[in-house]
Image (cartoon, rainbow, N blue to C red):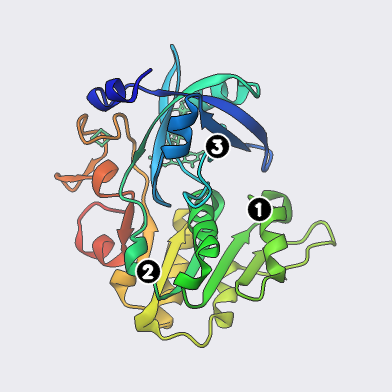
Amino acid sequence: MSLAVRTENPYLPEPMRLIRRYPLTDDVHFFQVRAVDMERAMSLTYSPGQFMMVSIPGIGEAPFSISSTPSRPGLIEFGIRRVGRITDKIFELKENSVLGVRGPYGNGFPIERMIGQNLVIVMGGLGAIPLRSLLLYALDNRDQFDKIFLIYGAKRPAEMLFRKEFISLMDREDLNCLLTVDKDDTGKWPGHTGLVTTLFQYVKGIDPEKTTVVVIGPPVMYKFCVAEVLKLNIPKHQILMSLERRMKCGVGKCGHCIIGGYIYTCLEGPVFSYWDVLHMKGLI
Ligand SMILES: Cc1cc2nc3c(=O)[nH]c(=O)nc-3n(C[C@H](O)[C@H](O)[C@H](O)COP(=O)(O)OP(=O)(O)OC[C@H]3O[C@@H](n4cnc5c(N)ncnc54)[C@H](O)[C@@H]3O)c2cc1C
Ligand code: FES
């Protein structure tokens, strides 16, 4: 498959090989893929916060956030929750099998605007998947950011995605890694215990005008975490979130993802600011 053909047909998936897969939790698995064409694998670029369409021939395709960082080229990583037809088939794939992937799509996080700023990354549930991309990117380019806070809340340790990886970050002096579980049922949990909102008291010493906060998690988390973020006086356009809608084409053609009559979330999103959310009807 040549790159010229792919450029002409935006729907044509790229063959990618499944290099590694393993469970992150009971129902969310990690999938690491690489373009079969090595030249393409090394040249494929994307931004943290973008997504790709993953396809299984004869079954269909679905959007998944990219969890890897463009600062480590060659491999693309996804975290996928098994919920239905397509994800069932993806979970049946063995390492070394080939699947179709197209993209990247969506706007991603506005990295250029974040440079020089403090970064507060707040994650819950599947929100850890796209936010791991941003976190790893920021750590790989540590000089470009001021203070970095990671705030992650899960119900219990077994439900925390990338648990071991994030626990290992707790030792870093250039990252405020704040992990919490509602309940520790293991007796070995090294982080905090309590609701994710209790961690905001540790976000100190930041100029709110020079801080970007990114919150991605289940709807209930947005409600309570945004309230905490507002107490820190962060301007609304510097509070970012990723809003998922049903998507089919990913390229602004099918209209499945339109909200408010004219916003194509596959093109203008999935990343929006809290200001957008307050001013655009139908965004949440
Ligand atoms: C931009 C974007 C990024 C995404 N990133 C990820 C990711 O990183 N990891 C991940 O696991 N999933 C992600 N999703 C959701 C993923 O695309 C869906 O779970 C997938 O399409 C389900 O396909 P399926 O055929 O297995 O399930 P289906 O058979 O289509 O559905 C099974 C069940 O899941 C529900 N469902 C399906 N899609 C969604 C959805 N988008 N939101 C809520 N409920 C849904 C259905 O209503 C149904 O109850 C993302 C979606 C978008 C739009
Ligand atoms: S997913 Fe088709 S227009 Fe957005």
User: Residue, x 58% and y 27% (percent of image)?
Assistant: 18
- Is label 3 or label 2 in front? 2
Q: Which one is earlier in the sequence, the residue at label 1 or at label 2?
A: 2
Numbered disc 1: secondary structure: loop
Query: Is 190 left, or right, of 227 in this rendering?
Result: right
Where residue 66 appears, as percent x and y from the top left, is 47, 43
Q: Secondary structure at mark 3?
A: strand
The tag earlier along the polypeptide, 1 or 3, is 3
Q: Is residue 74 above or below residue 59?
A: below
Cβ of mark 3 under 8 A from ligand 1: yes
Amino acid at pointer 1: Met
Q: Which residue in the protein does label 1 denote?
A: 160
Q: Ligand 1 near label 1 (Cβ, under 8 Å)?
A: no
Mark 2 sits on what residue?
A: 114
Image quadrant in which you'd find residue 212: bottom left
Q: Amino acid at mark 3?
A: Ile
In this orientation, which residue lies closer to the viewer: 163 or 16?
16
Report how far apart the C-alphas of labels 1 and 2 lie in the structure.
Answer: 26 Å
Q: Residues within 10 Å of mark 2 (few under 14, many from 20)?
A: some
Q: Which residue is mark 3?
A: 80
Residue type indicated by callout 2: Met
Asked whether disc 1 touches disc 3, contact meaning CB atoms under 8 Å apart, the reply is: no
